Image (tube, grey):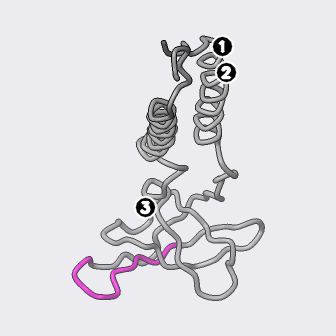
Amino acid sequence: MAVPRSPVRWALVLLVVGPVGVAAAVALWWPRTSTEVERVAATVVAPASCGGAEAYDRVELKIGDETHTAKLDGCGHQQNEVVEVVVPADTSGEFIVQDAASTPVGMPFDARLTTMLMCLSGLAGGLYAYLLTRRAQPTASAGAA
């Protein structure tokens, strides 16, 4: 006769796997570092045609107390059009700004969800492997001779 497994063992396994799964979900869901970037309003001073290799509009923007002229990573805007741009950290010399609407704000939701589900499936696979190895181990029998 085989020795039955104790339900306490199952509870202990679930007490380990459950919080690890929740901790993985929280770690992946928690916002990473701050993705705040400096956004400023810029005025297009020299629009460019989108047909050429140098299809960069020239914009004028004010950072602090200084007015800068920079390339806008885009084309086809109207002269004196105001666009919101993202300013790079280094604004010395010639620099390129991006349209704020095309800049990602943080890690996309689908990427976070995919990563979380991958972690949880790894945990489930580990639990399944644990259960298979436990089943393969011989159990002590009462009537063994």
Image marks 2 and 3: residues in contact by CB distance under 8 Å = no
Dot 1 amino acid type: Val
Name the one closer to the observer, 40 or 22: 22
Asked where in the image residue 17 lies, by quadrant, the reply is top right
- Which residue is farthest left? 51
Residue at image position (69%, 52%) is: 33
Q: Is residue 39 left or right of residue 111?
A: right
- Which residue is farthest front? 145
Q: Is residue 122 left or right of residue 66?
A: left
- Residue that badge 2 annotates: 12
Magenta stretch, main secondary structure class:
loop
- Residue 116: say if magenta: no
Q: Secondary structure at mark 3?
A: loop
Asked where in the image residue 110 lies, by quadrant, the reply is top left
Q: Secondary structure at mark 1?
A: helix
Residue at image position (60%, 22%) is: 14
Image marks 1 and 2: residues in contact by CB distance under 8 Å = yes
Residue at image position (60%, 68%) is: 61
Dot 2 amino acid type: Leu
Name the one closer to the observer, 36 or 71: 36
- Residue 57: say if magenta: yes
Other residues around mark 1 within 10 Å, as few (<14) / some (14–19) / many (≥20): few
Dot 3 amino acid type: Glu
Q: Which mark is residue 81?
A: 3
Name the one closer to the observer, 76 or 53: 53
Q: Earlier in the sequence, mark 1 or mark 3?
A: 1
Q: Earlier in the sequence, mark 2 or mark 3?
A: 2
- Residue that badge 1 annotates: 8
Q: What are the residue bounds of the magenta stretch?
A: 50-59
Q: Secondary structure at mark 2?
A: helix
**Viewer-side label of 1, 3:** 1
Marks 1/2: CA–CA distance: 6 Å
